[in-house]
């Protein structure tokens, strides 16, 4: 079991892949670049030759997939917040692909706390900006005193607690799945890890992506009400 601690520390360590002008580029950033390149190439391939009239079966399938993904965000946000659905769809696709990379032998970017923290900060900025757009700056500031002025400190703390909650929930679940998989490999190295990998690397990874997007959408909806 001593090797588990060393392996865990190695996984948590954000290694620098290379440096550019003295600036270190971490492994998670490189993997994200690879993801972006692959998604871009695939997008160019599947969207080539789209037709307005008499679309083919592949185009119809693609349109249904895009509509379904877009509908997830719109379903969470409601009619008033559907303008933010493209952001949620993009984050859902990124997290979904990132969490599945472990199957291919890559280190998922979501195992890097810096990645989950950056996503959480982006989300909380969008959440608060959405509130300001709807309520105005004065109304947004006034909302911190609702329902009564005495809860103002708690409402202000929530602005910082929300991104911390989003960040640690995503990072903790991805890390927890890794620890459980390592324990299973120690107990029975052959056979059993394959079955549990199908759950933790596929099902659980997609669930965590959805939970992050769902909570972000829920906070946006709450902010613009």
Image: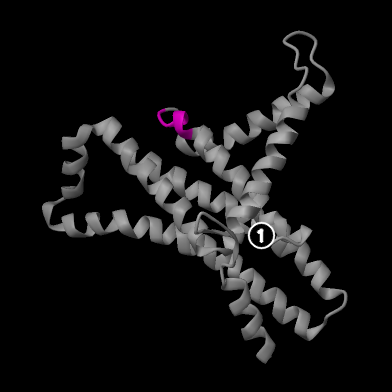
**Position of 160 compared to 196: left or right?**
left
Q: Nearer the viewer, residue 173 or 11?
A: 11
The crowding category of the residue bearing disc 1, from other C-alpha atoms within 10 Å (few below 14, some 14 to 19, many at least 20), is some
Is residue 83 in the magenta section? Answer: yes
Foreground of the two, 19 or 80? 19
For the point 65% across and 54% down, the residue is 31
Residue 167 x, y percent position in the rendering: 46, 59
SS under mark 1: helix
In the image, what residue occupies the spot 63% across and 47% down?
33
Which residue, given by chain and number where applicable, does mark 1 sit on? 204
The x and y percentages for residue 11 are 62, 72
| Magenta span of residues | 80-84
Q: Does the magenta stretch include residue 100?
A: no
Can the viewer see residue 225 in this picture? no
- Residue 204 versus residue 4 in the image, above or below: above
- Determine the image quadrant of residue 70: top right
Residue 4 picture location, percent across and down: 66, 84
Quadrant including the C terminus = top left
Q: In this view, does 90 lie to the left or right of 180?
A: left
Farthest-out residue, top: 53
Task: Give the camera-side residue of 171 and 158.
Answer: 171
- In this picture, residue 193 sits left or right of residue 34: right
Residue with the most extreme front position: 21
Rendered residue at 39%/46% (across/down):
219
Residue 139 at what x, y percent from top left?
18, 36
Q: Mark yes or no: residue 88 visible.
A: yes
Quadrant containing the N terminus is: bottom right
The residue depicted at 16 percent of the width and 36 percent of the height is: 138
Where 22 falls versus 137 (above or below)? below
Q: Which residue lies furthest to the left in this view?
A: 149
């Amino acid at each position: 079991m001593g090797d588990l601690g060393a392996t865990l520390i190695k996984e948590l360590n954000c290694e620098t892949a290379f440096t550019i002008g003295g600036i270190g580029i971490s492994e998670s950033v490189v993997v994200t670049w690879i993801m972006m390149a692959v998604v871009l190439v695939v997008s160019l391939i599947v969207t080539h030759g789209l037709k307005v009239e008499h679309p083919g079966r592949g185009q119809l399938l693609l349109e249904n997939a895009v509509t379904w993904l877009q509908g997830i965000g719109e379903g969470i946000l409601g009619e008033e917040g559907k303008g933010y659905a493209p952001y949620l769809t993009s984050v859902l696709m990124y997290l979904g692909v990132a969490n599945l990379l472990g199957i291919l032998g890559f280190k998922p970017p979501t195992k890097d706390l810096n990645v989950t923290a950056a996503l959480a900060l982006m989300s909380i900025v969008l959440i608060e900006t959405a509130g300001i757009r709807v309520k105005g700056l004065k109304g947004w500031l006034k909302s911190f005193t609702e329902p009564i002025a005495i809860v103002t400190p708690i409402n202000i703390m929530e602005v910082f607690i929300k991104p911390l909650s989003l960040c640690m929930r995503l990072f903790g679940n991805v890390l927890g799945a890794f620890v459980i998989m390592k324990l299973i490999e120690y107990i029975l190295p052959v056979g059993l890890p394959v079955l549990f990998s199908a759950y933790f690397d596929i099902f659980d990874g997609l669930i965590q992506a959805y939970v992050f997007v769902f909570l972000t959408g829920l906070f946006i909806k709450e902010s613009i009400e």
